[in-house]
Image (cartoon, grey):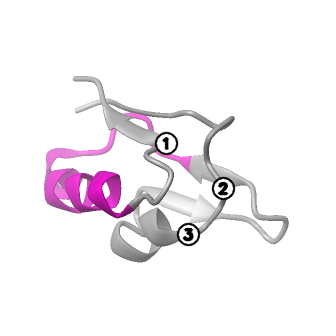
Amino acid sequence: MRIEVDTTVCASHGQCEFVAPEVFALDDEGKLSYVAEPGPEEAENVERAVRACPTRAIRIVG
C-alpha cells in the first residue's frame, strides 16, 4: 500500500492522525508528516483516514 497526501489541499484538521496515529502526525505548527508506505497492518486505519479527511487530501495509490 502506498499513500499520497496533497499538501496544498490538507487543512491540518487532524482526523487522519486520530484514526491512524502510526501513519499520520501533525507537528506543533500543524504540518503533516506521514508514512508513505505503511505496513499491511495499517491498511484498515489508512482507509478510515481517507474517508475521514474533510478535504479529501489523502489517497491510496497502490
Quadrant in the picture for residue 21: bottom left
State the image coordinates of residue 34 (x, y, percent, origin top left): 52, 48
Outermost residue toward the right in this view: 29
Asked if residue 9 is positioned above or below residue 14 in the image, the reply reads above
State the image coordinates of residue 31 (x, y, percent, origin top left): 74, 55
Asked if residue 62 is positioned above or below residue 60 in the image, the reply reads above
Q: Is residue 30 left or right of residue 5?
A: right
User: Disc 3 marks which residue?
Assistant: 14
User: Disc 2 marks which residue?
Assistant: 11
**Disc 3 versus disc 2: distance between alpha carbons?**
8 Å
Q: Are marks 2 and 1 in contact (CB under 8 Å)?
A: yes
Along the viewing direction, whichever of 18 and 35 lies nearer the viewer: 18
Along the viewing direction, whichever of 11 and 43 lies nearer the viewer: 11
Q: Quadrant of the N terminus?
A: top left
Residue displayed at 49% across by 58% down: 24
Residue displayed at 28% across by 57% down: 51
Q: Earlier in the sequence, mark 2 or mark 1?
A: 2
Residue displayed at 24% across by 45% down: 39
Q: Amino acid at mark 2?
A: Ala
Quadrant in the picture for residue 18: bottom left
Give the dominant element type of the magenta stretch: helix, strand or loop: helix
**Disc 3 versus disc 1: distance between alpha carbons?**
12 Å
> Is residue 41 shown in magenta?
yes
Give the extent of the magenta segment: 34-52
State the image coordinates of residue 15 (x, y, percent, origin top left): 46, 70
Q: Amino acid at mark 3?
A: Gly
Q: Is residue 17 left or right of residue 19?
A: right
Q: Earlier in the sequence, mark 3 or mark 1?
A: 3
What is the number of the mark on residue 57? 1
